[in-house]
Amino acid sequence: MKERTIDIPTRDGAMPTFITHPELGGQYPAVILYMDAPGIREELRDFARRIGTVGYYCMLPNLYYRDGGPSFPPSDQRTEEESERLTRLMNGLTREKMLSDTEAMLDVIDGDPAAANGSMGCIGWCMSGPIVVWVSAHWPERFKALAALHGVRMMTDAEDSPHRLLPKLDGEQYFGFAESDHWAPLEMVAKFKEELERLGANATLEVHPGTQHGFVFPQRKIFVKAEAERNWERVFAMYRRQLG
């Protein structure tokens, strides 16, 4: 494995980005990993490494770089002040900013000989559920394999609500939800699934039994290994079909 952290120049400053990919072989299809709300930590770098070990060029950007790139402990260990700051930062990641940051990453991918030209993937958890839909809908010719895991705010009244952008997606999508999640209640999940079916989308939606929001993260008390591994199985199978 090769890994490094670089500062990617963006419209709003330098964005620290962790990059990992296999050491041997040719060029590798690119996958952008969008962080969840607590921010960059070794747990996410390990996710990026896991994606790299199976043959992909994985980028993990620090989306909080505009505010110094902080990270936060899990919700059950967070102070009220930390929770309030996290919410402000999360709410500040608008669609416009995420498209701008992604455009900067695409420029780096296009210029890196380790990254293959052609179809790309993306994956996001929690707050990045909408982000992966935003970028995939904006660049459908590039993003062909989208994974959104226990995504939040997937159906809202906003113009850029993910459910409104589903017709613009291409390739294949995987949506994995927790069975118990106040950020994504089952009623919303059912409506989201109905929208996918109405559109005839090339998508899979699963509700993972016995899970709560954040169940995929090994460092959390609510980690459910069997369902987390099922997530990875689904995602990597989709990447193989769409990216090679």
Image (cartoon, rainbow, N blue to C red):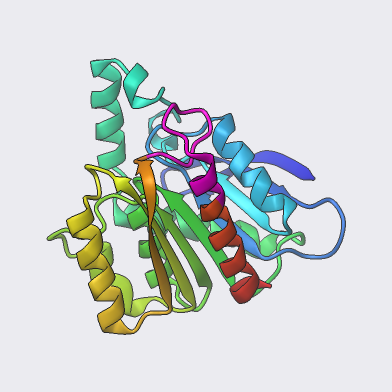
Residue drawn at (17%, 65%) of the image: 159
Which percent across, then down, holds residue 92? 27, 42
Question: Where is the N terminus found, in terms of image quarters?
Answer: top right
Judge by depth and name the residue closer to the eye, 43 or 212.
212
Residue 19 visible in this rendered orientation of the protein: no
Which percent across, then down, holds residue 157? 12, 60
Residue drawn at (57%, 69%) of the image: 238
Which percent across, then down, holds residue 170? 44, 79
Residue 167: which quarter of the image?
bottom left
Judge by depth and name the residue closer to the eye, 40 or 73.
73
Residue drawn at (25%, 17%) of the image: 81
Residue 111: which quarter of the image?
bottom right
Asked whether 11 falls inside the magenta stretch, the response is no
In this view, the residue farthest toward the left is: 157
Judge by depth and name the residue closer to the eye, 184 or 48.
184
Question: Where is the C terminus found, in terms of image quarters?
Answer: bottom right
Q: Relative to 222, is 107 on the left or the right?
A: right
Q: Relative to 190, is 41 on the left or the right?
A: right
Q: Which residues are magenta?
A: 214-229
Q: Predominant secondary structure in magenta?
A: loop
Asked whether 222 falls inside the magenta stretch, the response is yes
Which percent across, then down, holds residue 101? 45, 52
Residue drawn at (63%, 52%) of the image: 58
- Rendered view: 196 above or below 188: below
- Rendered view: 70 above or below 26: above
- Rendered view: 36 above or below 11: above
Q: Relative to 102, is 190 on the left or the right?
A: left
Judge by depth and name the residue closer to the eye, 167 or 109.
167
